[in-house]
Image (spheres, rainbow, N blue to C red):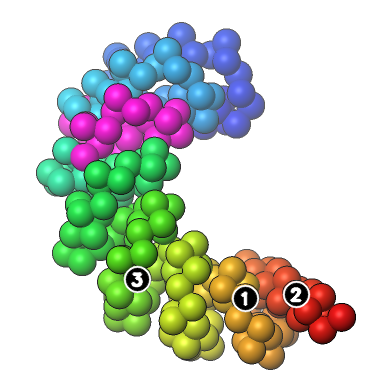
């Protein structure tokens, strides 16, 4: 994976060979991730084949992730098929995320179904995120339900993020409850971020309390960012 972070484009031929031929799924998995990070467009045919045929779910899932990072529009039919049919939750989740990154509006019915019905938390959470990316306002009731009721913190946090993206002001009370009470840091942090996106200036005292008291650094950071944005906005309006 370090190869991808270093943008070592000269490694692409070796990575492609590993993706095609290595018998170890962990190696193929790392190759798929690195090729996506490298934006290696020449890898698209092999990534599509991996998504379609690899027996290892994690490898298929990271092929889907790479195809999303590469913005491969011709991958949409295979990504939709993976979202609908793959037995591995990681694959379904990464397919959902890729469809959101690709702004595939035809995926909305399948993403809504995934959010409502998928048994895998990663798949439900990624569907929530994708619905936010796609600006699907009709998803707000389902996202609110997920924020309130889903047992998986990843899903609640992703729902909070999507509600912020959708500028769903009706979500403020539930986001505030999440910020105050949720046991999961990802959920609390994204609730803090969403309250800033929603310009909910009335929540500044809670954001400041979170900044002072939350044990999770990432939550405190997001609370600080939102509080600062809201305070700056309030000062600007009052001038």
Q: Where is residue 130 in the image (x, y as percent from the top left)?
A: 37, 53
In the depicted structure, whether residue 35 falls above or below residue 191: above
Residue 218 screen position, x and y as percent = 62, 67
Give the total number of marks visible in the rendering: 3
The answer to whether marks 2 and 1 mark residues whose Cβ atoms lie closer than 8 Å is yes
Q: How crowded is mark 3: few (under 14 residues within 10 Å), some or many (20 or more)?
A: many
Q: Which portion, as a residue range, is magenta?
A: 54-80
Instruction: Decide whether residue 66 is among the magenta residues.
Output: yes
- For the point 87% across and 80% down, which residue is it? 239
What residue is at 43 percent from the left and 53 percent from the top?
A: 133
Q: Name the residue under label 3.
A: 140
Residue 193 position in % (x across, y down): 58, 69
Q: Indicate which disc residue 199 carries.
A: 1
> Is any atom of residue 121 visible in this view?
no
How far is disc 1 from disc 3 in space, using C-alphas? 17 Å
Q: Give neighbour class at mark 2: few <14, some 14-19, many 20+ (Cα, 10 Å).
A: few
**Residue 145 appears anywhere in the view:** yes
Residue 5 lies left or right of residue 80; in this view the side is right
Relative depth, front residue between 101 and 53: 101
- Of callouts 2 and 3, the N-terminal one: 3
Q: Distance between the residues labelled 2 and 3?
A: 26 Å
Which disc is residue 233 wearing?
A: 2
**Magenta stretch: dominant secondary structure:** helix
Of the two numbered discs 2 and 1 on the same chain, state the one appearing first in sequence. Answer: 1
Q: Is residue 28 left or right of residue 200?
A: left
């Amino acid at each position: 994976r370090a190869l991808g972070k270093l943008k070592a484009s000269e490694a692409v031929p070796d990575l492609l060979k590993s993706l095609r031929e290595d018998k170890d799924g962990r190696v193929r998995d790392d190759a798929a991730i690195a090729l996506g990070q490298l934006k290696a467009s020449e890898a698209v045919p092999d990534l599509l084949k991996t998504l379609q045929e690899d027996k290892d779910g994690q490898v298929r899932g990271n092929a889907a992730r790479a195809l999303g990072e590469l913005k491969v529009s011709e991958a949409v039919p295979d990504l939709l098929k993976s979202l609908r049919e793959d037995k591995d939750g990681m694959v379904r989740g990464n397919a959902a995320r890729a469809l959101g990154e690709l702004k595939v509006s035809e995926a909305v019915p399948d993403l809504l179904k995934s959010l409502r019905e998928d048994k895998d938390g990663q798949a439900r959470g990624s569907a929530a995120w994708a619905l936010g990316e796609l600006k699907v306002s009709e998803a707000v009731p389902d996202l609110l339900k997920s924020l309130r009721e889903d047992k998986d913190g990843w899903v609640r946090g992703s729902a909070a993020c999507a509600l912020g993206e959708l500028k769903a002001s009706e979500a403020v009370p539930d986001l505030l409850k999440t910020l105050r009470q949720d046991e999961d840091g990802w959920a609390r942090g994204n609730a803090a971020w969403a309250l800033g996106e929603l310009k909910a200036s009335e929540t500044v005292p809670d954001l400041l309390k979170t900044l002072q008291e939350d044990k999770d650094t990432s939550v405190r950071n997001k609370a600080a960012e939102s509080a600062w944005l809201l305070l700056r906005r309030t000062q600007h309006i009052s001038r």
